[in-house]
Image (tube, grey):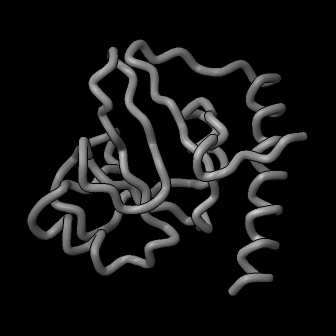
Amino acid sequence: MTFPDACNPAIFHEDVFYEYFLPYRHPASRYDIWGGHGLETFGEDFEIVRNADKNFVWTVLDCGEGPDQWIVPGMAFVNRVCYLLTEVPHNDAPVQFRTEGRPRPITQLGLTRRMTTLRRIMQRQESTTVACG
């Protein structure tokens, strides 16, 4: 398996993101966006994001090319739609998740296969973070 890097991240379906990273609605969130999980890019919601552990913060991006949006690790500012917080840290792993403009769930077999790939990437990223940190 060739491992992804920052310039060539692994791309997954959004269902893999939800299954692995477990996004949640912050109890102090003021808005109901992104299926209830999203935090706005301004005001009190933005303060929640700014004060959160950066390893649990994700940004939903609108890249302007078609209806798809992207979930990427960290706190981005350009083309941001909202932020997400997760129960599982990303450790700055080189991964991205595509949310399709026309939602289509991934099959159970596809989800299982992609989860295996993501687990390998995350294990490698965690061992790299521990070795360097």
Residue 132 percent across, percent down from the top left: 73, 83
Q: Residue at x 25, y 55 (%)?
A: 77
**On the rendered structure, is 73 left or right of 64?**
right
Q: Residue at x 83, y 31 (%)?
A: 113
Quarter location, residue 52: bottom left
Residue 105 percent across, percent down from the top left: 58, 20
Position of residue 41 relative to residue 52, above or below, is above
Residue 123 percent across, percent down from the top left: 81, 62
Which quarter of the rendered picture does the C terminus lie within?
Answer: bottom right
**On the rendered structure, is 88 left or right of 130?**
left
Quarter location, residue 43: bottom left
Q: How many marks?
A: 0
Position of residue 52 relative to residue 84, above or below, is below
Q: Residue at x 75, y 58 (%)?
A: 122
> Is residue 81 visible in the rendered structure shown here?
no
> Is residue 8 visible in the rendered structure shown here?
yes
Quarter location, residue 8: top right
